[in-house]
Amino acid sequence: ALALLTAPAEALDCSRKAQAELARLGLGEADIASIRYVQKYNPNENGPDVLGVRAWVRLTACASGYLVVDMTRTCFVRQSYTRGECRLEGVTAY
């Protein structure tokens, strides 16, 4: 039961860093339809259980696809990129 309580809290701890990255990209509240935080788990037995967090951001300007903010487990932003049909100037699309 403890793992269920701590896992979402860890992901939510990165929300401030994700918001700062969105601001850096010039996005405000009106540009964001929703944000979902997903933890990246370590498939190996060695090392930490959680490797990082990704914020999947649905932008109001994108009919489909997401802006993804990829962060380490200490919430350092590694990179931001778009997926699907979503495009944002200055951000790599995959």
Image (spheres, helix red, strand yellow):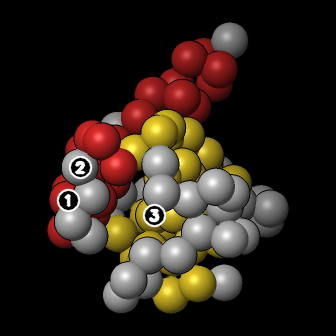
Q: Nearer the viewer, mark 2 or mark 3?
A: 2
Marks 2/1 in contact by CB < 8 Å: the verdict is yes
Element type at mark 3: strand
Give the amino acid type for the residue marked by disc 2 in the picture: Gly
Numbered badge on residue 28: 2
Residue visible at 38% across and 83% down?
Answer: 89
Classify residue 53 as left or right of residue 47: left
Numbered badge on residue 53: none
Foreground: 21 or 2?
Answer: 21
Give the amino acid type for the residue marked by disc 3 in the picture: Val
Location of mark 1 (residue): 23
Query: Is residue 29 at least partly visible in the picture?
Result: yes
Classify residue 10 as left or right of residue 39: left
Which of marks 1 and 3 precedes in the sequence?
1
Q: Position of residue 14 (x, y in %)?
A: 35, 46
Residue visible at 35% across and 49% down?
Answer: 31
Residue visible at 49% across and 38% down?
Answer: 34
Foreground: 42 or 84?
Answer: 84
Q: Position of residue 88 (x, y in %)?
A: 43, 76
